[in-house]
Amino acid sequence: MKKFDQINVIPMIDVMLVLLAIVLTTASFIVQDQLNITLPETEKTRPLPADQVEKSVQIAINAQGQLYFNQQPIALTQLKLLLHPLRRQQTILLKVDRQARFGIFAKVIDQLKARGFENLTIVTQHAS
């Protein structure tokens, strides 16, 4: 009988890298679904470039009026503090549920306008 001096770990590393890729791929879908935002439908929409989404700061408002900054729940009073260190040229994606109250949307826009942000995109979905 032959004695084993070493264990070959390369197949285990290959399997772990595949599992890591699967987890990272599905994690973004889980976060997106967690917010549960139904975007308003529009006729004249165009897809967002992937690089714009990756570089942007995302602000979301769900149907209950809860505010999210990069998928993290925040209070409206915290938004001003989170926007302060950002450059005015920073791309901001605003996702608002179609059932959200207009008042919270107007307050968010007011804070963005007061800070002087130039690249604001309101995200909608194409009407089918």
Image: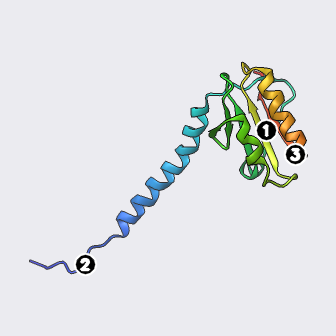
Residue 109, numbered label:
none
- Report crowding for label 3: few under 14, some 14 to 19, many 20 or more residues within 10 A (C-alpha): some
Examine the image and state in which quarter residue 14 appears. bottom left
Separation of disc 2 and disc 1 at Cα? 52 Å
Amino acid type indicated by mark 2: Gln
| Foreground of the two, 102 or 17 | 102
Identify the residue at horizontal 61%, vertical 37% (top origin): 32
Identify the residue at horizontal 65%, vertical 22% (top origin): 64
- Report crowding for label 1: few under 14, some 14 to 19, many 20 or more residues within 10 A (C-alpha): few
Asked if residue 57 lies left or right of residue 45, the reply is left
Q: Which residue is mark 3?
A: 115
Mark 3, secondary structure of its residue: helix
Q: Which residue is mark 1?
A: 47
Separation of disc 1 and disc 3 at Cα? 27 Å
Identify the residue at horizontal 78%, vertical 30% (top origin): 124
* Comparing labels 3 and 2, the label whose residue is closer to the camera: 3
Amino acid type indicated by mark 3: Arg
| Foreground of the two, 74 or 33 | 74
Q: Which residue is mark 2?
A: 6
In the orientation shown, which residue stands out farthest toward the left?
A: 1
| Foreground of the two, 115 or 33 | 115
Compared to 75, does 18 lie above or below?
below
